[in-house]
Amino acid sequence: CFSLNSITIPDSVTSIGTDAFPSSLTRVDVSSLEIWLNITFESNNANPLNYTQNLYIAGQLLPSEIVINLNNVLTKLIV
């Protein structure tokens, strides 16, 4: 699992636990921004954007500025 470099998060995922992803991650795919925003991350280490800024929504790479802002917002929401 440590050589895993891309993941596709299914629409059915609603929460992700701590340390679910390796630091080798370089790409995250989800079907929609709505799906991404409805995922609950158990901690900052549960968010795959801590390892990569390559977030693809419906196959399209989001600009890194947007990904950084999304990650900052999610980090503030995690208690």
Image (cartoon, grey):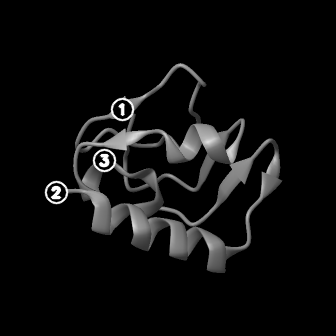
Q: Nearer the viewer, residue 38 or 7?
A: 38
Residue found at x 49% / y 40%: 38
Task: Identify residue for label 3.
Answer: 46
Q: Nearer the viewer, residue 40 or 23?
A: 40
Left or right: residue 7 compared with residue 59: left
Q: Is residue 6 visible?
A: no
In the figure, 49 relative to 29: above or below? below
Q: How far across and down, in percent of the image, does residue 59 sit?
A: 82, 44
The amino acid type, in three-letter code, at marker 3 is: Ala
Callout 3 touching callout 1 (CB < 8 Å): no
| C-alpha separation, residue under disc 3 versus residue under disc 2 | 12 Å
For mark 2, give the secondary structure. Answer: loop
N-terminal of the two: label 3 or label 1?
Answer: 1
The amino acid type, in three-letter code, at marker 1 is: Ser
Q: Nearer the viewer, mark 3 or mark 2?
A: 2
N-terminal of the two: label 3 or label 2?
Answer: 3
In the figure, 61 relative to 35: above or below? below
N-terminal of the two: label 2 or label 1?
Answer: 1
Task: Identify residue for label 2.
Answer: 79
Q: How far across and down, in percent of the image, does residue 5 sit?
A: 55, 46
Task: Identify residue for label 1.
Answer: 15
Mark 1 Cα-neighbour bin, 10 Å: few <14, some 14–19, many ≥20: few
